[in-house]
Amino acid sequence: MENPTEAQRLQLQQTVEWIRHLLGYFVQAAGFFIAADALLLGYGIGQKKAVFLLFACFSVIGMAVALWLFIDITIPASCVAIHLERELLGKDAIGLINLVLLSRSVAVYERLVRFDEARTNPERKALMRGALPLWDFVKGPSLLALLAMLAAQTVFFVVSLTALHYSFA
């Protein structure tokens, strides 16, 4: 491309498309786990077998793992997008990716901005390695909703064994 800003715009567009593509994969994975959860719960209740209720609890854990992987994989793309938005719009302007990250996780946003401003490779590697702090993930609303769902299903599993006398096998 003759104009470097046009090349940067194209790269930003490709980065956003890649994030959208990854979001599609996450939606497919979440749909699989939601369907598995519903089927296992329904079958377990219908057949009065607690083992299927236990497996339904594992599908909630699968959803949490899929969410973690999605967030972890999108961090490098978000880093590229932050860099490009800051170059195209100026350091003080807030672009779409900047705004989304800033509204979701201030710690991740600040770390990626420091990565963008870092000058040496070892400094950049250290910042990228811990870009998604586990505590920020744990206290996020999506994971809290999954943990509540896991707790409810685990309680139902225990109640089905003790009070409802479902068989385990």
Image (cartoon, grey):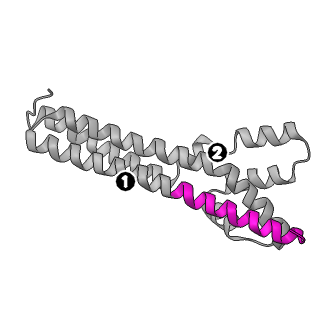
- Three-letter amino acid code at disc 1? Gly
Q: Earlier in the sequence, mark 1 or mark 2?
A: 1
Which residues are drawn in magenta? 1-23
Which residue is the extreme one toward the front?
1
Residue drawn at the location 85% of the way across and 66% of the way down = 87
Magenta: main secondary structure equals: helix
Q: Is residue 9 magenta?
A: yes
Distance from label 1 to label 2 (Cα)? 24 Å
The quadrant the N terminus occupies is bottom right
Q: Is residue 73 magenta?
A: no
Residue drawn at x 79%, y 63% as measured from the top left: 84
- On the image, numbered disc 1 is attached to which residue? 31
* Position of residue 146 in the picture relative to residue 92 (left or right): left
The C terminus lies in quadrant: top left
Q: Position of residue 27 (x, y in %)?
A: 44, 56
Location of residue 141 in the rendering, given as x and y in whole percent from the top left corner: 48, 55
Badge 2 is on which residue? 132
Task: Give the class, few, some or many, for how many residues have Cα within 10 Å of label 1's Cα (few <14, many ≥20).
Answer: few
Q: Quadrant of residue 64?
A: top left
Observer-nearest residue: 102 or 124?
Answer: 124
Q: Nearer the viewer, residue 96 or 19?
A: 19
